[in-house]
Image (cartoon, grey):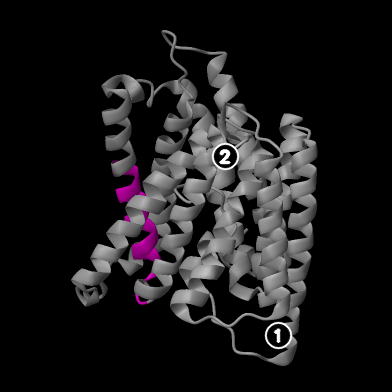
């Protein structure tokens, strides 16, 4: 079959189908990461797990970089690079360190210390905080639906924290907070601040430069920090055959197929389709954790999930209302669209 015929067939597929496949795969990535880690525990090398979460993040970033270079290399032309100011590079470097290294490392560590449901529910701090910072720093105007949706989602986070965590616990002011939950919250705050910084500082930077630079610098910084904290032997099994045979499969599905489906869906997706795809992702992630890992939500998580669903519905109605009223809303940049549904920003 000719390439032109394949492109014609791909163009005929509705954008909603591409987005659905992408979101489904992204929602499964957390659970699949946990499974890979468990496979490594059953195939130790001198007492070490070759598919540790650090190795998964490190090798996954390398695989992701291998995909991004052929997709975005055209953005790296001398004229574009010369147009970027020192301020652009400084902001890009800071964002890359925090969202390409520190936040993903915290999220991966959290997966090993708490349930996927808690990772998702407490991670909803990020869009809420981003909304607050956007109102404060960017002058974003909100309608009642959006405010109600944010409050409902925040209520879900509070309920999940107050009614109990799942993992290593620390007692604080009369209630217990898990180590994993704290790591998720810190990662969410870091990512939220970086998202607002993107809107303030990185609007003019092409997507290809942003993506490749963040991935490359984030991987290097993560490697250096992990070696300082855990020693030079921490990545001793980073090139073991067992790790790479699973990571190549993981990269093919999560990094290549999911990201390409997301890109193809973005080309023709309406704002409503994009909003729906990003809204259902956290709910679908918890559902996939139940199907794949058999992680049954606790009572606290059920309450938190119920409030989250209410928040998603209110936000979706608010978006439809804004479109109907033809209000001017800030249009998402390519960088924001690209990152919207992905749990691990470093991947």
Graded by Cα atoms within 10 Å as few (under 14), some (14 to 19) or many (20 or more), the crowding at tag 1 reads some
Relative to 124, say whether 160 is above or below. above
Near-viewer residue (7 or 141): 141
Instruction: Identify the element where label 2 is drawn.
Output: helix
Q: Which stretch did the figure color magenta?
A: 204-220
Instruction: Identify the element where label 1 is drawn.
Output: helix
Residue 230: image quadrant is top left
Residue at image coords 64%, 55% = 22
Near-viewer residue (266 or 168): 168
Which quadrant is the N terminus positioned in? bottom right
- Whole-Å distance between the Cαs marked 2 and 1? 36 Å
Q: Is residue 182 left or right of residue 79?
A: right
Residue at image coords 38%, 64% = 208
Report the mark closest to the observer, 2 or 1.
Answer: 2
Q: Is residue 69 left or right of residue 128?
A: left
Residue 274 appearing in the image: yes
Q: Name the residue under label 1.
A: 323
Which of the two discs, 2 and 1, labels the residue nearer the N terminus? Answer: 2
Residue 175: image quadrant is top right
Q: In x, y percent, where is residue 88?
A: 27, 70
Q: Mark 2 points at which residue?
A: 181
Q: In x, y percent, where is residue 16?
A: 72, 66
Prevailing secondary structure class for the magenta stretch in the rendered image: helix
Graded by Cα atoms within 10 Å as few (under 14), some (14 to 19) or many (20 or more), the crowding at tag 2 reads many
Q: In x, y percent, where is residue 82?
A: 19, 74
Residue 337: image quadrant is bottom right
């Amino acid at each position: 079959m000719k390439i032109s015929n394949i492109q014609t067939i791909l163009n005929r597929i509705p954008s909603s189908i591409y987005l659905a496949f992408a979101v489904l795969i992204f929602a499964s990535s957390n659970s699949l990461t946990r499974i890979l880690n468990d496979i490594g525990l059953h195939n130790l090398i001198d007492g070490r797990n070759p598919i540790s979460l650090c190795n998964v993040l490190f090798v996954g970033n390398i695989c992701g970089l291998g995909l991004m270079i052929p997709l975005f290399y055209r953005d790296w032309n001398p004229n574009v690079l010369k147009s970027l100011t020192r301020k652009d590079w400084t902001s890009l470097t800071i964002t890359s360190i925090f969202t390409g290294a520190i936040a993903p490392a915290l999220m991966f560590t959290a997966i090993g210390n708490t349930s996927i449901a808690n990772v998702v529910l407490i991670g909803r701090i990020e869009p809420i905080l981003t909304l607050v910072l956007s109102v404060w720093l960017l002058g974003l105007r909100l309608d009642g639906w959006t405010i109600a949706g944010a409050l409902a989602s925040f209520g879900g986070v509070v309920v999940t924290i107050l009614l109990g965590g799942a993992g290593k616990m620390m007692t604080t002011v009369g209630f217990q907070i898990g180590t994993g939950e704290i790591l998720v919250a810190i990662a969410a705050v870091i990512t939220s601040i970086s998202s607002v910084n993107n809107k303030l500082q990185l609007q003019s930077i092409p997507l290809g430069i942003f993506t490749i630079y963040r991935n490359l610098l984030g991987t290097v910084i993560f490697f250096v920090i992990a070696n300082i904290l855990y020693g030079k032997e921490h990545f001793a099994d980073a090139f073991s055959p067992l790790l790479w045979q699973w990571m190549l499969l993981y990269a093919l599905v999560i990094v290549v197929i999911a990201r390409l489906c997301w890109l193809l869906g973005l080309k023709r997706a309406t704002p409503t389709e994009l909003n729906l795809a990003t809204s259902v992702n956290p709910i679908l992630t918890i559902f996939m954790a139940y199907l794949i890992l058999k992680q049954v939500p606790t009572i606290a998580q059920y309450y938190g999930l119920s409030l989250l669903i209410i928040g998603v519905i209110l936000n979706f109605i608010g978006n439809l209302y804004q479109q109907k009223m033809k209000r001017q809303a800030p249009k998402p940049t390519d960088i924001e669209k690209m990152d919207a549904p992905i749990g691990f920003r470093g991947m």
